[in-house]
Amino acid sequence: MSFDVADTSGQSWFGPGQGLTRIFGFSFIASLLQGMGTKLESIGNAAGGSNSYFGNSMKLFLLGTIIESGRRFFSWAMERFKPFQYSITAHFSEGDPAYDWIILFLTEEKVWTRSRQFQVNAASSLRQWTVNLASNPKPGGHVDEHAEYVPTYDEPQLFRWRGYWAEIRRSGSQKNQANYNAFIMDGSGSLGKLSLTLYTRDMSALSALVDDARKKYMATSRPHVIVHSADQAMLSNHRGGAWRNAKRKNRRPLSSIILQEGVISSLVKDAREFIKSEAWYIKAGIPHRRGYLLYGPPGTGKTSTIYAVVSRNVVDAFCECLTIVLQAGELGLEIYSLALSSNMLDDAMLARLVSSIPKQAIILIEDIDCAFPSREDQENEESSMRGMMMGMNMMGMNRRAMNMARPGSAVTLSGLLNVLDGVGSEEGKLFFATTNYVERLDQALLRPGRIDVKIPYQLATQEQAAALFVRFYPDDELTVDAGLDIEKKSLPDFAKPLDIPALAERFASFVPQHEFSTAELQGFLLSCKNDPLRAADEVGAWVEREKKDKLERLKREAEEKEKKEEKKEAHETKRLRGGLARLGVSVGGQEPKFEALPYLNSTVTPQHRAKVDDKPDANGAAMDQYHAEASTSKVSQVVDPNGSTLL
Ligand SMILES: Nc1ncnc2c1ncn2[C@@H]1O[C@H](COP(=O)(O)OP(=O)(O)OP(=O)(O)O)[C@@H](O)[C@H]1O
């Protein structure tokens, strides 16, 4: 006799305790059934041939009842008797940093070798813990070909780790595009989840495995700077675990950042000191956090500084002071970068994102001013929002949809402050922020404890221009050929071919102080990448051209601003007319044009009809009064500032 038993409990057969219990359980049931079956058969035979059918049916019925009862009894017993629960299961959700650790761990442990299904992506800067299917695997298991292979782990995979049996399985993964799309579109479905079952009752084995996974991950990513950013689609869905985008960037040497003397070294010194003095902070009862604000015009090197500083010196400092616990090189720092400009991000989501950042990480908020619109933007926004909200309300859109349609960030100052204060509760977190408009930042944000160090950035000085030139044309890489047509160039004596410092000086002499960003100068030098002589020769003309272009751009911007103002004024006038028309008032002796007044659908009643002079300069005052009085529904008279009655 054989039985097909579905494992509805979802428990695996690999647990030694469970497997044995089940085997013994079934043999007991089988022998019991056999005994009962014989009894029923003998009753049937004694009663006559027609009763053998009854006997067989009863036998089947009893068999089914006993199997089901036995199954229920065993699952009940397994749940109650802890000693038989010989496994621990941990779940890892996609979007959480620990998910990346475990994926890399599985790759390194070669668990994928029995996988028959892979997700194939075109190789990109997005980090994927891929496996190398080539015959000559490279260290770390990465392929530097054009495609990446990520095992899907859809089928449960059994493997050994430090003498323990472990099983991994995946559910609702991103590779299931329909599921992922459903998740993004309407929040149904779920993101990828990995379940890791360890067949032991020793909890410390699980934590050792997770720790091992984390260390492997840190060691593998150490040659690079890993920058995490939030997945916009996930934010739009208002779901957690949005740290799904991770980019691998090459480490940038500190020497490649050209700033005024001492800026970088003091920043590095400060960060290192902060990291090393954790004990002091704890003793003094001060939250162990440090906030840095880098502010100045675009393209002056703020972001580049953070990547360079963080990637080497701070990581090394972390490693140095933690050698007691960890071997140097096992720990790295990753950057979690937040863009407050996203209108998908609100206070709740921001708090959730920050709280899911692991310890010893860098939080970077670029363009932190985006959470606070300028006065001008605020005014524009207010007037445009009134009309937009009204329209959206009429279309029955909900509040969240309105928020998303609203330009700019939905993060408030208090939401941001809460998050920054919360950063302090996680030991050793460094917080970096950059902005182009420091004057827009609230004083509450800038107070020590939230922002401890402020570093100003300026447009390039002549010294910086010269240093940038030298970095572009390192001596040892230049040959006489690189000078090209040296004979033809009538350079003065001080600019001997390939005398890079002299050429750099000449180059810098054409660059006016604090007028161009380092990024702009870099752009020009890139256009003469292999030709230092041409760069030194043509920079003067380039500077003149750029100055002219800038002037024209400024003029154009001023004109556009003026036009915008006019348009805004015209729009306000139109709104006034609309308001008056609703009361049945004709403007400038003309009938109101209803087709041009989108918000109105009221009928003009003759008794409300009146005349009003069309005075554009008085419209603003008239409109204010209209609004004030319309709210109390007693518009009877509108007077302009000069005292003449308009209505
Ligand atoms: N001081 C600098 N030293 C070296 N390179 C620089 C410097 N400033 C800018 N660059 C170069 O210019 C480019 C832009 O720099 P970066 O993004 O760091 O500027 P930023 O100040 O952060 O700009 P934004 O405010 O627009 O974000 C980079 O390629 C970087 O190499």
Image (cartoon, helix red, strand yellow):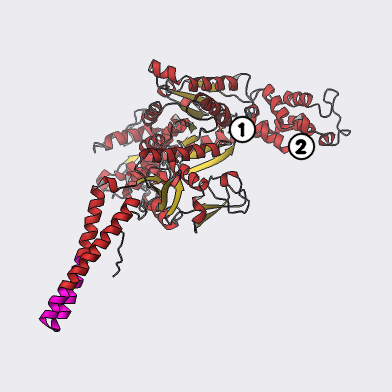
Q: Is residue 97 above or below residue 21?
A: above
Nearest the camera: 547 or 168? 168
Q: Is residue 231 visible?
A: no
> Can you tell me whether the CB of the residue at mark 1 lies under 8 Å from the nearest atom of ligand 1?
yes
Q: Is residue 13 above or below residue 98?
A: below
Residue 287: % across, % down: 40, 22
SS of the residue under disc 1:
loop
Q: Identify the residue at image location x=30%, y=47%.
A: 85
Nearest the camera: 596 or 474? 474
Residue beneath label 2, please?
530
Position of 450 compared to 496: left or right? left
Residue beneath label 1, please?
252
SS of the residue under disc 2:
loop
Report the magenta residues as a range: 40-65
Give the alpha-carbon distance from disc 2 to disc 1, as whole Å.
22 Å
Q: Identify the residue at image location x=29%, y=33%.
A: 628
Residue 538: % across, % down: 76, 32
Q: Chief secondary structure of the magenta span? A: helix
> Is 58 inside the magenta-drawn segment?
yes
Ligand 1 appears in which quadrant?
A: top right
